[in-house]
Image: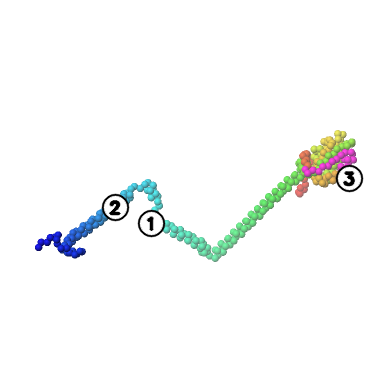
Amino acid sequence: MTLDPLNAPHEPNGQSSAQDTPDLGPMASNTGHSTDSSAHSGTQTGQSTSTTISGETRTARQAKSQTPMSAKRRLTLALKPRMTRAQILSALLVGLLGFALVVQLQLSQKDEYSGLRQSELINLLDEITRRTDELEGEEQRLRTLVGELESGQNTQETARKAAEESAKVQGILSGRLPAQGPGITIRVTEGDEPLRAHVLFNILEELRNAGAEAVEVNGIRMVTSSHFADTTAGISVGGVVLSPPYQWKAIGDPSTMQPALEIPGGAMASVRTGTGEGTITQQDEVRINATVEVSEPSFATPNTPDN
């Protein structure tokens, strides 16, 4: 019986005959094999690409390593110190040798006197003691010498200063040196009658007795040998005639000299008795510039201890 496919009976919904289902096994198997082949082919391609990249990296590194170094880098590498094993061993040996020498030196210093006998140690101690005594004696001698030199120098310096002071004092008292200091000034004028030489002499004596250290009258320095004399031309001092008024300068204690001149019956009283006038003025500073040349004594000589 001929069946029309179009008119063939249908199975219920959702069901089909196994016979009606085409056999796709070989086709599916072939498709799986193709997929595996494609995957395998992709793996081989990735491996090939990785191998190519690795080869290029090694080629680049080799090329970089073969690139010539710069001159600066070569010089730095040449000058860089390199410690070899032999140098390290040499340094260790030198250090050990130095340590051994130090230890040996310390041991030799400690044992310097350990090998001496008792008698030798006693002799060594005696020698050290004797040398110490000699040095102490030398030190004492030098100290004494220094003290003598200092004392002698001080004595000489003191004597020199004393001589200078004495020369100044003697120079002022003898009239050889100018002088200045507190004192008085005196102005004596004549009246109707001229003054006599003894009036001026009394003034000089009162000043000396009152402690005057330097005296000047009309520009003439009064010294121990000075004297007044009456002449037809007037009163003279050492051959020099003075003209009134008589200007006196005296250096000393003003509070002592003025009362000494003003005592009743004294020098100023004798001036006023002859109708003359005399005025005294105290001053803080009086300058006496007049000097005299002191002549050498004809008979007197200094007295020395030998005489």
Relative horizontal placement of residue 167, taking residue 66 as reference (left or right): right
Q: Position of residue 279 (x, y in %)?
A: 84, 41
Secondary structure under tag 1 reads: helix
Q: Position of residue 290 (x, y in %)?
A: 78, 39
Residue at 19% over, 65% down: 12
Q: Using the rendered view, name the quadrant where residue 9 is placed.
A: bottom left
Mark nearer the N terminus (1 vs 3) = 1
- Split into 4 quadrants, where in the image is the N terminus? bottom left
Residue for badge 1: 85
Return the residue found at the far bottom: 118
Circle 1 Cα neighbour tier, 10 Å, few/some/many (<14 / 14–19 / ≥20): few
Mark nearer the N terminus (3 vs 2) = 2
* Discs 3, 2 touching: Cβ within 8 Å: no
Relative horizontal placement of residue 104, taking residue 129 as reference (left or right): left
Residue for badge 3: 264
Q: Position of residue 116 (x, y in %)?
A: 52, 64
Residue 213 seen from this side: no
Relative horizontal placement of residue 104, taking residue 255 as reference (left or right): left
Disc 3 residue type? Pro
* Discs 2, 1 touching: Cβ within 8 Å: no
Residue for badge 2: 53
Q: In this figure, which colouring scheme has been used for the structure?
A: rainbow
- Residue 287 vs 81, above or below: the answer is above
Q: State which region is magenta.
A: 265-285
Q: Nearer the viewer, residue 228 or 66?
A: 66
Circle 3 Cα neighbour tier, 10 Å, few/some/many (<14 / 14–19 / ≥20): few
Q: Position of residue 150 (x, y in %)?
A: 67, 51
Disc 2 residue type? Ile
Q: Nearer the viewer, residue 276 or 43?
A: 43
Return the residue found at the far top: 233
Viewer-side label of 2, 1: 2
Disc 1 to disc 3, C-alpha distance: 125 Å
